[in-house]
Image (cartoon, rainbow, N blue to C red):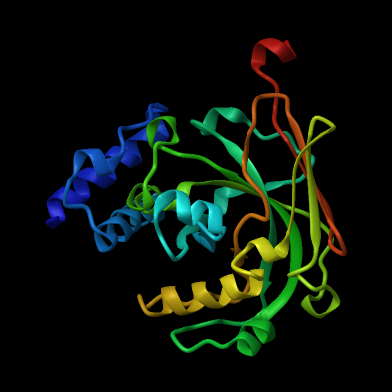
Amino acid sequence: MDDKTRADAAQLLFEAYSNGKPVSPLTSTYDDLTLEDAYAIQLLQIDWFLEQGRSVKGHKVGLTSVAMQRLLGVDQPDYGHLLDDFFHLEHEPIAMGRFLQPRIEPEVAFVLKRRLRGPGVTAHEAIAAVDFVLPALEIVDSRIEDWKIGLFDTIADNASSGAVVLGSTPTAISDVDLRLAGTVMTQNGTVVGTGAGGAVLGSPLRSLVWLANTVGARGVTLEEGQVVLPGSVCAMVPVSAGDSVTATFAGLGSVTALFAPDEEDSA
């Protein structure tokens, strides 16, 4: 793809945020779309967001489960950017109007106390860079209609990022075995998902190392204070206005996301 075609594709996704209308899969519109094109399209949108005064507060890793990789026919994860206005306080109602097709999944969030720059980052260097971990819920969303995404579609669409709710119980990474920490996610009091950290590339820490080395090869540094979402421990589920979703992590505590009711329901 040439620069103009990349910009046209990025514009389609960028406009979906404001008009609320998902677009057809990019892979069905652009036959020659490549991995490099997809990341370039993602970065074009991020640059436009930054020009609006927003800022990058971290990154997310997606496609970390074997099931999702098999579904999309890939053998590695992908990543996206977390912007400042993605973050919501737990128990504070989240307006649904900003989302197109929201779903939710539980993750363990890393908060960094020092910079991580790859390539060449090792596991012990990643551990040393982590300030603490938090229970988290990621709200994933797609600007691609009906979630008909391939690998290049989701990469171009900022790895299907939507929003983040962080818990309020920081835990030292040395105080919990992230591979074995079990998780239960409930939606309006009903269990909708269970899993453990091992579902994330064998360990969420491995996901952090992969991210640092992958973005580092592209000239990007994970900065002090940034948040990294390493991937979900169970399948995502759709959410609707008025929902309450809680994820409880063994050894880490819990986090709750509340979704504001429709205006007609709250009147």
**Is residue 98 found left or right of 167 in the rendered image?**
left
Q: Which of 193 and 105 is in front in this view?
A: 193
Q: Quick one: quadrant of the C terminus?
A: top right
**Residue at horizontal 33%, vertical 40%?**
13
x and y percentages locating residue 137 in the rendered image: 69, 49
**Residue at horizontal 40%, vertical 59%?**
74
Q: Quadrant of residue 51?
A: bottom left
x and y percentages locating residue 24 in the rendered image: 30, 33
In this view, 73 is above or below 185: below
Instruction: For residue 54, say whether it is visible.
Output: no
x and y percentages locating residue 266 in the rendered image: 73, 15
Q: How many marks?
A: 0
Q: In which quarter of the image is residue 181?
A: bottom right
Q: Nearer the viewer, residue 92 or 71?
A: 71
Q: Quick one: quadrant of the N terminus?
A: bottom left
In this view, 116 is above or below 253: below
**Residue at horizontal 46%, vertical 49%?**
71
x and y percentages locating residue 31 in the rendered image: 17, 46
**Is residue 247 found left or right of 208 in the rendered image?**
right
Q: Which of 52 and 136 is in front in this view?
A: 136
Q: Which of 263 and 178 is in front in this view?
A: 178
**Residue at horizontal 68%, vertical 83%?**
127
Instruction: For residue 245, say whether it is visible.
Output: yes
